[in-house]
Amino acid sequence: MDPIVDFRSIGVSLGGHPVLRGVNLTLAPGEVLGVSGPNGSGKTTLIRTIATLTSIDSGSGTVLGTDLTSTSLVPTRRKIGMIGHHPALIPELTLTENLTHAARLAGIEVTRVANALGVVGLEGASDRRADACSFGMRRRVEIAHLLLTRPTLLLLDEAASGLDSSARDLISAMVDSTRSRGGGTVVVSHDESQLRGIAENVMSLSGGRLEPSR
Amino acid sequence: MTFWPQAFEIARVDLIVERRIGDTLRIVLPFAVVALMVFPLALGLQLSTIRDIGFGVFWALGILFGMQVALRQSAADTPERRDLQALLGVDAAARFVGRTLSGSVLMGGFLLILALAMLALYAPRLPTGVWPVLVVSTLLLGIGLTELGTLAGEVTTGLRARTSLASLIVAPLALPLIIGASQSVEALEQDTGILPWVLLLVTSDLALAVAGVALARPLEEATR
């Protein structure tokens, strides 16, 4: 079976500074890969590169079978779901409006929005504006968003930080669901012990180099 | 989802956000009307002068404050929003068209209200048949300014000096628009034919639309 992510000696520079150096990474279908590293080690850049949102300077790689240098990345990107540092909600819209907007842009049935909000425990706050919600609630909306798009490649960048145990359980369930569909997950965190609980393979990123964690 | 539904969805949400933020109606429009009132106050009782400068002041204030509408907060995406849109499969060209649609609605409304305020405050001499020409010129100016603002917004995405840089891009490129709009009304008064000026406006709008759609995708990747 083809790997979901296959990176060979990938190098990425931002603002003239090398951030990733010679990164080799393979993510098989159903695999959960953990990446740990201190602040500034390049974890977010790695996640964005896997999401095809940051272009590479050297090396080669494929994501879901598409070359990273391809000019038509839109179909591949539609199969990727990502939770980053900051929730990507429109503050002036309600939680329902935010999800409906995302569903319409992605061509997903908007009738699934109410159910997704219910699954993450936000049915009672569906008419509340995003700027009136706590960080944890906005994170739950992002998880609801992933329930709508059902990505084949799930990318979690410090997604569990600042969340209570029930929200962490939702993320774990999301990872399990992706795995059961044959998708792959990359979880990034500076807390290696947290990664050991959900990832079968943990790697360490330091100075832009990715190595097996000891 | 195809191109047009994405564009209409982006325009719909832009207008909802704008209605809730109220940048155009509650901030830019009142300031523009106050600026309109400054000239009659400064010129005192010289009514003939006030009547002569009415349209000129309108076009100048229209472009100055119109830039604020074109570069409004509701049309600025955070990097996280742009990433999410990319992962949802949003076509950058559809986003440009959507932003232009919502911006044109706002800009058209803003300029038409400003024009009515100018007519009330300055009571300029109105040549025969001025209304359709004024409405068409104002709308074409509004569409062109919005296209320029949206394009400049894309170029300056993520930059700290976004507003000032975007204004520097828009100002010189808006010259054909302001010349076309102002001269179409002037030509009506001089009875010299408005067609070349309306054509200048239409051509500028079309050229900006083509440039915006063609550049949207490479700009999105370059500014990521």
Image (cartoon, coloured by chain):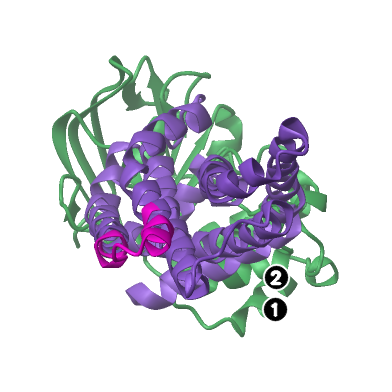
Chain colours: A green, B purple
A205 w.r.t. A24: above or below: above
- Which residue corresponds to the image point at 69% horizontal and 37% vertical from the top-left? B39
The location of residue B17, given as percent across then percent down, is 66, 59
Horizontal side of residue B202 vs B10, given as left or right: left
Q: Quadrant of the C terminus of chain B?
A: top left
- Which residue corresponds to the image point at 78% horizontal and 69% vertical from the top-left? A126
Among the two numbered marks 2 and 1 on one chain, the one whose residue lies closer to the N terminus: 2
Label 1, residues with CA under 10 Å away: few <14, some 14-19, many ≥20: some
Q: Could you say which is closer to the camera, residue B99 or residue B120?
A: B120
Write down the residue under mark 1. Answer: A114
A30 w.r.t. A40: above or below: below
**Do the residues marked 2 and 1 share a common chain?**
yes
Label 2, residues with CA under 10 Å away: few <14, some 14-19, many ≥20: many
- Which residue corresponds to the image point at 18% horizontal and 43% vertical from the top-left? A61
Chain letter for mark 1: A
Labelled disc at residue A96: 2
B58 w.r.t. A178: above or below: above
Label 1 sits on a secondary structure element that is: helix
Q: Could you say which is closer to the camera, residue A52 or residue A93?
A: A93
The location of residue B48, given as percent across then percent down, is 64, 46
Q: Could you say which is closer to the camera, residue A7 or residue B103?
A: B103
Residue B53 visible in this rendered orientation of the protein: yes
The quarter of the displayed image where residue A16 is located: top left
The kind of residue tagged 2 is Thr
Label 2 sits on a secondary structure element that is: helix
Horizontal side of residue A5 vs A92, given as left or right: left
- Which residue corresponds to the image point at 54% horizontal and 47% vertical from the top-left? A198
Q: Which region shows up in magenta?
A: B183-199
The kind of residue tagged 1 is Ala
Q: Quadrant of the N terminus of chain B?
A: bottom left
